[in-house]
Image (cartoon, helix red, strand yellow):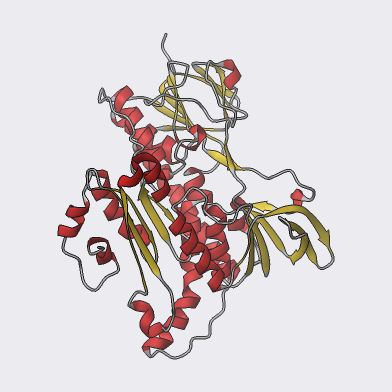
Amino acid sequence: MKHDFDLVVIGAGSGGIATARRAAEYGAKVGVAEFDRLGGTCVNRGCVPKKLMVYASHFPELFADAQGYGWSLVKSSLDWEKMITAVNDEVTRLNGIYQRMLDNSKVEILQGYGKFIDAHTIQVGERQVTADKILIAVGGRPVKPEIPGIEYAMTSDDIFHLKQQPKHIVILGGGYIGSEFACILHGLGSEVTQVIRHDKILRGFDEDLQTEIQQAMGNHGIRILTNSQLTKIEKSDTGLLVKVRKDGDGEETIVVDAVSLAATGRKPNTQKLGLENTKVQVDDNGAIVVDKYSQTAEDNIYAVGDCTDNINLTPVAINEGRALADTVFGNKSRTMSYENVPTAIFTTPEAATVGLTEAEAREKYGDAVKVYRSRFRPMYYTLAGKDEKTMMKLVVDQNTDKVVGAHMVGTGAAEIIQGVAIAVKMGATKANFDATVGIHPTSAEEFVTMR
């Protein structure tokens, strides 16, 4: 049977577009169904606008630090509307770039929400199209907890479109999204209270990394309510009344003008795809079940990215998509490796990590684990007169001398760990690190001088 397309991709995010373009390079006729702007979460509601706001949030501290280097006091104020407009203008520019890339690859954009009629047929708006292969790349969505007054709260997606800067905001959740936005908004001048259910933020990351960032955030003026839960939100003449219950310590009411549920979890965006018309299986969280080749239970249907709820990172979705296109359309069978995937947390201070946490390493290697740790004040802060710390940590399996984990908190952590990740991915030993000459004076040299 002849189909309209060799491949139809549902979702024009990073993973979907990467797959579409790579498949088209191999000569496939490709269509992409998308009801929203091109680029998905990363470009429109995630990595890109968030990182631009991170940059904006750092200027006040740079102005202050400059005085230690002889610069006069800078008095400056934030034009929130100008900043938000500039951020969204850049997103619009990137949308156009994605459009041109797809046009140049001769990929047809099918405007509308894609829904399965059967395993080879997709309904997109008023149009039905058929495809030999179909890729689901619909990403995820933020979810709100079911508490009274939740309609007065926004998700992390909404922050990029706020018309006015919050004077005082409560952020619920201690994951990387909530912690990043706590730091961003505090840096921009908002009063921030972060409510977390556990005793530490960034659950699942290395414990030293958690401790270092949480301590720094508190020192900077962010109020973190640990072991606490938001129970109710009420609207009043003075603002939003946020009820917070702390374990063993009663209830507190916080008056704010905004509530962000930035890190209460995300779910795969699979609820309206018509998957019941196929053999595609989902787990209890709605994530699509795939094998190592990103193939679902339906032979011709695949899925990549956050909708599979594997490692929810943009570069992972891109790599999964390209591996899929190489395998299916390029006759170059390969799979995505999920070992030693680096990631960053754009809090203030910044953090980045690759490989195993200390706890994971001890569970895997037992007493053979040796940890090398360094904590120091970077040179930059000496003249600025600040007691800001950088923490670096290597986790080593002494049986092989391999570095199985590297973690950093401090300025430039993401840029530094990206290079370290290459070494960890290649199986570098502690001896290899020790034999590498450091670049002096830098913070990064500490990774090759730790004893």
Foreground pick, 445 / 272: 445
Residue 153 coordinates in the image, percent (x, y) = 71, 53
Q: Is residue 251 left or right of residue 130?
A: right
Q: Quadrant of the N terminus?
A: top left
Q: Quadrant of the C terminus?
A: bottom left
Foreground pick, 188 / 174: 174
Tell me where residue 256 sits by quadrant.
bottom right
Task: Residue at 35%, 28% (x, y): give it.
Answer: 324
Q: How many labels, in total?
A: 0
Tell me where residue 65 sits by quadrant.
bottom left
Residue 170 coordinates in the image, percent (x, y) = 67, 61
Task: Pick out the residue farthest to the front.
Answer: 367
Task: Residue at 47%, 52% (x, y): give it.
Answer: 47
Asked whether residue 90 appears in the rendered view, the answer is no
Task: Residue at 58%, 26% (x, y): give it.
Answer: 273
Residue 395 coordinates in the image, percent (x, y) = 32, 52
Task: Residue at 18%, 54% (x, y): give it.
Answer: 431
Task: Pick out the residue farthest to the top.
Answer: 1
Foreground pick, 242 / 303: 242
Q: Is residue 428 left or right of residue 181?
A: left
Foreground pick, 327 / 417: 417
Asked whether residue 343 appears in the rendered view, the answer is yes
Work out whether 301 lies above or below 163: above
Work out whether 422 lies above or below 126: below
Residue 143 coordinates in the image, percent (x, y) = 64, 43
